């Protein structure tokens, strides 16, 4: 196994952007959200989601209404735990398979809740994205989320202080994409990842 970078940070802190920048530099990206979209498209998972969160989370064609599901799944700790129990095991299996397939190539994990995952022991370097709440709120607004949605989702995760304390490296991400690219290059250099 080669270098495995685990990204930590608040919701809308820029983890996916950092993963994309690293991918452009030859690091293998593993995107849990993309894998989760594959998992929730499976008929048995869709049926389980509809049973737990209401038949109306599926539209007339049987496709998932992700916004409605998110609204219900992030409404309480119990609802979030139910969503995680239905989706996360299959996503973890796919992540593990992608890690195995990468061999010795460097990998970046863009995985929510990674710190609490059984996959955490495969991470060789933890990177916390330091981003202000105002910047995260602006990014959430760009996603057309309700004003309190970012904070609501973040409340269902480990505290930012806990994530920061677990990190080996801190990557500040309050500037523009060019600044972030320079910071990513420097970080990869520190980690011994050729770019």
Image: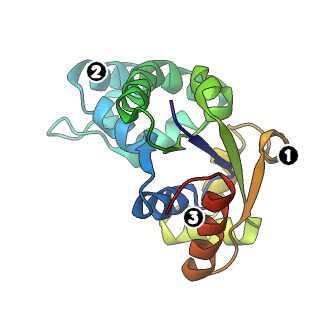
Q: Earlier in the sequence, mark 1 or mark 2?
A: 2
Per the image, label 1 sits on a secondary structure element best described as helix
The residue labelled by disc 3 is: 140
Give how far apart the Cα atoms at labels 3 and 2 are: 29 Å
Query: Is the residue marked by circle 1 packed among few (<14), some (14-19), or many (20+) residues within 10 Å?
Result: few
Per the image, label 3 sits on a secondary structure element best described as helix
| 128, above or below 86, in the image | below
Q: Nearer the viewer, residue 137 or 69?
A: 137
Q: Nearer the viewer, residue 24 or 79?
A: 24
Mark 3 or mark 2: which is in front? 3
Q: Earlier in the sequence, mark 3 or mark 2?
A: 2
Q: Nearer the viewer, residue 148 or 91?
A: 91
Occupied quadrant, residue 53: top left
Q: Position of residue 188 (x, y in %)?
A: 60, 58
Q: Is 167 on the left-hand or right-hand side of 54?
A: right
Q: Position of residue 11 (x, y in %)?
A: 63, 53
Q: Is residue 1 visible?
A: yes
Give how far apart the Cα atoms at labels 3 and 1 are: 20 Å
* Residue positioned 45% across, 63% down in the render: 25
Which residue in the rendered view is the most extreme toward the left? Answer: 61
**Which labelled disc corresponds to residue 190?**
none
The residue labelled by disc 1 is: 161
Q: Is residue 40 visible?
A: no
Q: Is 64 on the left-hand or right-hand side of 179?
A: left
The residue labelled by disc 2 is: 47
Q: Earlier in the sequence, mark 3 or mark 1?
A: 3
Give how far apart the Cα atoms at labels 1 and 2 are: 37 Å
Mark 3 or mark 1: which is in front? 1
Q: Nearer the viewer, residue 56 or 154?
A: 154
Query: Is the residue marked by circle 3 packed among few (<14), some (14-19), or many (20+) residues within 10 Å?
Result: many
């Amino acid at each position: 196994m080669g270098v495995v970078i685990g990204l930590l940070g608040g919701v809308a802190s820029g983890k996916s952007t950092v993963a994309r920048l690293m991918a452009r530099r030859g690091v293998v990206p593993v995107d849990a959200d993309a894998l989760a979209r594959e998992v929730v498209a499976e008929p048995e998972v869709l049926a389980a989601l509809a049973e737990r969160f209401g038949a109306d989370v599926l539209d007339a064609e049987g496709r998932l209404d992700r916004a409605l599901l998110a609204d219900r799944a992030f409404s309480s700790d119990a609802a979030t735990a139910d969503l995680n129990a239905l989706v996360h095991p299959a996503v973890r299996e796919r992540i593990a398979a992608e890690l195995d397939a990468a061999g010795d190539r460097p990998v970046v994990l863009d995985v929510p809740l990674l710190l609490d995952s059984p996959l955490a022991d495969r991470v060789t370097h933890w990177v916390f994205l330091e981003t202000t709440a105002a910047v995260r709120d602006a990014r959430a607004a760009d996603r057309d989320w309700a004003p309190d949605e970012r904070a609501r989702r973040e409340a269902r995760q480990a505290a930012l202080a806990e994530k920061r304390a677990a990190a080996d490296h801190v990557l500040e991400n309050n500037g523009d994409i060019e600044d972030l690219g320079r910071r990513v290059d420097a970080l990869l250099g520190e980690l011994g990842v050729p770019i």
